[in-house]
Amino acid sequence: MVLTKLGTLYRKWENWILPALFVLILLLLLGLRFDYYYDLNDDVLMKDILSGVYTGAFESRNVQMLFPLSLILSLVCRIFGTSYVYGLFLCVCQFGSLYVILYRSMRFAAKTIGKAALGLLESLLFAALLLPQLVFVQYTVTSGLLTAAAIFWFLTGKKAEAEKSAGGFLKKNLPPVLLCILAFLLRPEMLILLLPLAGVAGLWKWAEERPVFTKKNAACYLGVFGLILAGLLIGQAANGIAYGSAEWKEFFRLFDARTEVYDFKTADILKYEENREFYDSLGLTEEEAALLGNYNYGVDDRIDAGLMERISAYALEKEGYFGKSLREGLWLYKARLSNTPGLDFDAEQEFPFLLTEAVLIVLLLLAAYLGKRAALLWQLLLFGGVRSVLWMYLILRNRVPVRISHPLYFAEIVMLAAWLLHYLKDGQFTAKEKLSARRWLNPVYVSAVLLFVTAISLFPRSMEKTGEEYASREGINRTDTAARAYYRGHPENLYLADVYSTVQFSEKMFRDGETLLGNYDLLGGWLCKSPLAEKKLEAFGYVSLEDALVNGENVRLVSLKGESWEWLEAYFRERGLAIRVIMEERIPGGTEGNELEVYRLQKEEIS
């Protein structure tokens, strides 16, 4: 009797339960083998801001994500008194996105065995393509996965003709709208990058309506776009209000100019000798310009928004908006498509994505051929044209890190997979009379076999690469863990670290859940000179980093073993101050060859 009831309950909720089982299995396998990491120190700092570690208060603004979302996460951190909230949020979003894709796929299989096979196939592909991103979590990637899930939901939904009214269609597509808005609040730039692909998905689906151009169809498809746009505008407006003070506006001028200089331009712009005339025109000496080159510009109070904007304008004038010529960009784009090794991308990392896309395109062409669906040709041409424009933009801007390229690849794969499921479900080629003489061409069977072979062949290397990266991080971050313990053991001091000595460190998501004020900061970086950075310094009795270095008796400097502080001594000499940087001790417990050292500042009389 009980088993019968359970069986009935399972059949009723099968499309919900099976995806949950596959996601739980994936979670379990990863949890047994790895700990979850923040991929970059950017996420670590965002977590510290939200949870009170940075300023001593649960801050509702963390600069990188939009205010409505950061406010909610900050409040949850306050309620539960733990810094785990941000990490849990990212994991829920990532695995939730995978769940959405699995759940929406279940309707394309009629029997349990088919649903299980489809779930297994997709789970294997997730692991083969995204295993490193699922273990080493980064908010830009998370935003991309949310957007990909939204596109998949939309493409696998019913057409407008199946709904009685435009309102019903909009209601059914409210989940993908909300996923897009959440992705935007988390990382606006990622959602905006992927929005053209979402537009292609909309055109694909709209073109399937019969007739195509009706008032109802326009209301349905433009209505979905309008809801997304309204959500983005409301989120942006709320963010503008939250950061509306003069102090925050001044900081974002600095932040935007800094982003242009450090993220999109070459390091040559920051070299004094090669740009002496320009830096002299700014009134910057070689010693002051050195602070820009080593990213420790927080040391100098003179480097403000106005100065950084002039450097940004000079960089744009000298190197242009795009860092590469169109000819060079086209060559690099072709090299990426052909997976040419030895260039500015990791060919081995990109190969699984390119292979999976190629397999899906071949399967789509086969399905379209057998189903006599010539429309696929313009659909693929539109898709290829838009994805080419997106990739060319990134290549020409000199900005294609893995955290951007991999979500872009994944969104493309999800679109093609959703459309393949749509074509396989269409039914025009499944009649027995069409398949009796060419059973081996049945696209359902061919798709399943080819994709299983692809996933199984890629998965072992993905696991191996993730294991290698995990072992490397365990060693490197042993130094950072020792440093954090050292700082806590000396609460009377404020530790200021050289920026490039810390960029290699990340942090385990669920390490200690601390929410107490941390007595450490950086001498530069993206948060430098913000109201939050000033608030942190005020907690230790200083008005700026320069004030702390010049007047602080309890201030200590931190850098990797062997790093020189001559640039700082030279900077102070140029300012008429005789300050020596003297090593005090080496932080114990670090990884050999990657230790951190603590320095004190000793003021001397100028002879």
Image (tube, rainbow, N blue to C red):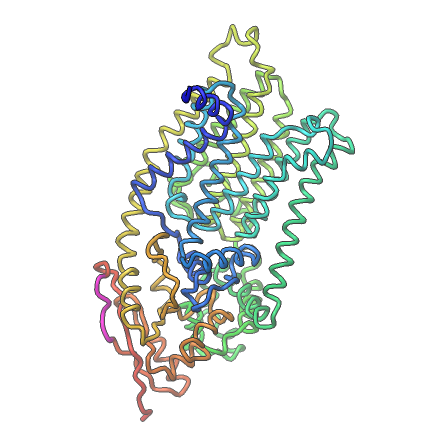
Residue stretch in magenta: 584-589
Location of the N terminus by quadrant is top left
Percent x, y of residue 272: 44, 72
Tell which residue pokes out farthest to the right in this image: 215
Q: Is 76 located above or below residue 180 in the figure?
A: below
Where 570 sits versus 200, above or below? below
Picture coordinates of residue 396, whole percent (x, y): 53, 50
Residue at the extreme bottom: 607
Whether residue 457 appears in this view of the structure is yes
Q: Closest to the observer: 390 or 409?
A: 409
Q: Position of residue 283 (x, y in %)?
A: 51, 80
In the figure, is residue 182 to the left or right of 139?
Answer: right
Q: In the shown orientation, is residue 577 left or right of residue 594?
A: right
Q: Viewer-proximal residue, 481 or 470?
A: 481
Residue name at image x 69 percent, y 33 percent: 168
Is 59 inside the magenta-drawn segment?
no
Query: Foreground residue, 88 or 250?
Result: 88
Q: Residue 220, position in %: x, y?
A: 71, 35
Counting the numbered discs, the total is: 0
Which residue does the image show at 23% across and 60% down from the upper left? 593
Toward the viewer: 109 or 325? 109
Residue 226 versus residue 53 in the image, above or below: above
Quadrant where the image shows the C terminus: bottom left
Residue 79 position (above or below residue 282): above
Q: In which quarter of the image is residue 489?
A: bottom left
Q: Which residue is drawn at 52% across and 19% down?
A: 110
- Can residue 586 be found in the magenta stretch? yes
